[in-house]
Amino acid sequence: MSSLTVLMPVYNERATLREALDRLLAVEMPVPTEVLVVDDGSTDGCTDTIADLVESGAVRLIRQDPNQGKGAALRRGIAEAEGELLTILDADLEYDPRDLPELVAPILGGDAKVVYGARSYGGHAAYSFWFVMGNKMLALWASFLFDAWLTDIETCLKVAPTATWRAVDLRSDGFGIEAELTGKLLARKERIFEVPIRYKARGRDEGKKIQWTDGVAALWILLRIRLRGR
């Protein structure tokens, strides 16, 4: 694996997009890295803030219009990615791109094929008790269904060969794509390697979009994949 694509789905992230990309571009990656932004029908002009990065070639920008959901943006980016490895980084500053080299290392070293960045929830790392409990319940549910042991399946930072991302045939348009990916990887008997990462959650007033209904949908997605297989 000699190259990496960092895929950033964006929807109305004007307040944070530029800083997220500046942080990412400042990280020394172990392999040549493509930064691919998929703008999912933003209406706040957020991509205007990165016009110089796109013009210089530091960032590749793809636009989808109208808004179709995070899953749809990820599926478009996965189809367009040019790197041999692929990972996702949200534009909301919750995740630290300095963790990416540590996630890529087990794959480059031949110790793993799929790596997840596992969050540890301290006081600064979650905006509510139910947010943490919901994430822990989903991880336990997935572990039970597929006879595995995972601590964080909703993490944004997941690294795998681009060919693997494409082979699982993701179909979700919304936030359910996180559970769908994990379920389909586990159904394929992929062993997921977890690496601790830093995390700082934002609250509703800062633009967090995921709802409790997305958690309920994720439970059903995992069960459906378990019952149907791949």
Image: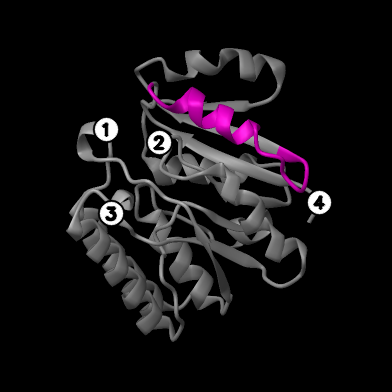
What residue range appears in magenta? 15-33
User: Type of residue at label 2?
Assistant: Asp
* Secondary structure type for disc 1: helix
Q: Check if mark 2's residue and mark 3's residue have beta carbons within 8 Å.
A: no
Label 1: how many Cα within 10 Å (few below 14, some 14–19, many 20+): few
**Sequence-first disc among 2 and 1:** 2
Spatial CA span between label 2 and label 3: 19 Å
* Secondary structure type for disc 4: loop
Kindly identify which numbered label has been placed on residue 206.
1
Q: Check if mark 4's residue and mark 1's residue have beta carbons within 8 Å.
A: no
Residue indicated by mark 4: 2
Q: Give the side of residue 67 with respect to residue 9, left or right.
A: left
Label 2: how many Cα within 10 Å (few below 14, some 14–19, many 20+): many
Placement of the N terminus among the 4 image quadrants: bottom right
Front tag of 3 and 1: 3
Q: Nearer the viewer, residue 102 or 8?
A: 102
> At 53% across and 70% down in the image, what residue appears?
185
Outermost residue on the right side: it is: 2
Q: Check if mark 4's residue and mark 2's residue have beta carbons within 8 Å.
A: no
Residue indicated by mark 3: 123
Front tag of 3 and 4: 3
* Secondary structure type for disc 2: loop
Outermost residue on the front side: it is: 123
Residue 78 among magenta residues: no
Kindly identify which numbered label has been placed on residue 92.
2
Spatial CA span between label 4 and label 2: 28 Å
**Sequence-first disc among 2 and 3:** 2
Using the rendered view, name the quadrant where residue 65 is placed: top left
Spatial CA span between label 3 and label 4: 38 Å
